[in-house]
Image (cartoon, rainbow, N blue to C red):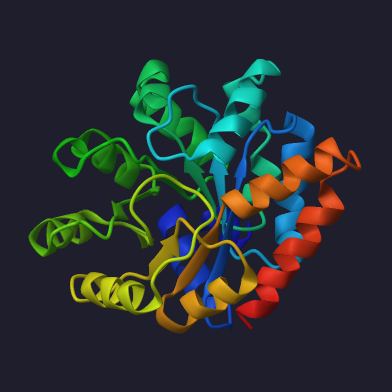
Amino acid sequence: MSSVETATGVERIAAAFAGHGRKAALMPYLMGGFPNTDDSLRIAQAYIDGGADLIEFGLPFSDPLADGPVIHGAAVDALAGGVVIEKLLDAIAPIAGQVPVLVMTYFNLIEARGVERFLGRVAELGVSGLIVPDIPIEESGALLEPCDRHGLALIPLIAPTTPDERMAEICAQARGFIYTVAVTGTTGERGADAEGLAKLVGRVRAHTELPVAVGFGISDPEQAARVGEIADGAIVGTRLVREAREAHEGAGDPIPAVLELVRSFSAALS
């Protein structure tokens, strides 16, 4: 039995952040089921081939809290295409066997399937953790304790507007890493103030020894390189989803385009 098969999700995440050998770990995001289930899994494999250390795997949801128009549009298209969440989850296993996979979803999708049943299933499939943006710290016990039992990391989000006192509370409950949002608002391509982002990451580090990864707004390799100077991980979402859409609607196959783009982000972090 390999170490991947025996390690918990929390342990695999820690190993990914400790062993990437670059400025920072690269964690690209994809929308499961977009442009269709098979291609979304091929995109995930392209991410791995392009140098991803971890993957954030979004589940399509009709009423997202944190997603901007590009990612929301991908979710709408995936749902319109008839994606089935259970089949999508089952298809994650081959990807999760290669790199840690963080499922990004909303609490309704989990609660509707039963917390224990959902968490037990994703743990069996090799998922390493969950990102659930719409569950506040005051209610996170509904997921945190069962996640701990299944070896899954429940990743918290911290925003630029989070006060220090609340930041300390969030970090105290964190598992895996801290997802630090670079800009206020939803996901999307826009530049963050570098000095302000460095101060934000410094504030987060003051409350935790876990890795600090930055997401929201990283739209080109140069921005990723700057994030790599101050944080432990760079999360790239909207830029890659847009690339997949444009390639799918143009040439028809998004894989070569996203592979090249991920390679450019990976090289920027080297």
**Tally of numbered tags:** 0
Image position of 266 (left or right of 163)? right
Image position of 245 (left or right of 170)? right
Question: Is residue 42 something that shows in the picture?
Answer: yes
Question: Is residue 89 something that shows in the picture?
Answer: no
- Where the C terminus falls, by quadrant? bottom right
- Where the N terminus falls, by quadrant? bottom right
- Which residue is found at the position 24% from the left and 41% from the top? 145
Residue 198 % position (x, y):
33, 78
Residue furthest toward the left? Answer: 165
Residue 194 % position (x, y):
40, 76
Of residues 185 and 92, the one nearer the viewer is: 185
- Which residue is found at the position 53% from the left and 62% from the top? 218
Residue 98 % position (x, y):
67, 57
Residue furthest toward the right? Answer: 251
Of residues 161 and 79, the one nearer the viewer is: 161
Image position of 200 (left or right of 118)? left
Q: Is residue 22 above or below residue 13?
A: below
Residue 27 % position (x, y):
56, 61
Q: Is residue 224 above or below residue 101?
A: below
- Which residue is found at the position 50% from the left and 61% from the top? 12
Of residues 172 and 236, the one nearer the viewer is: 236
Q: Is residue 268 above or below residue 128?
A: below
Q: Quadrant of residue 245?
A: top right
Q: Quadrant of residue 158?
A: bottom left
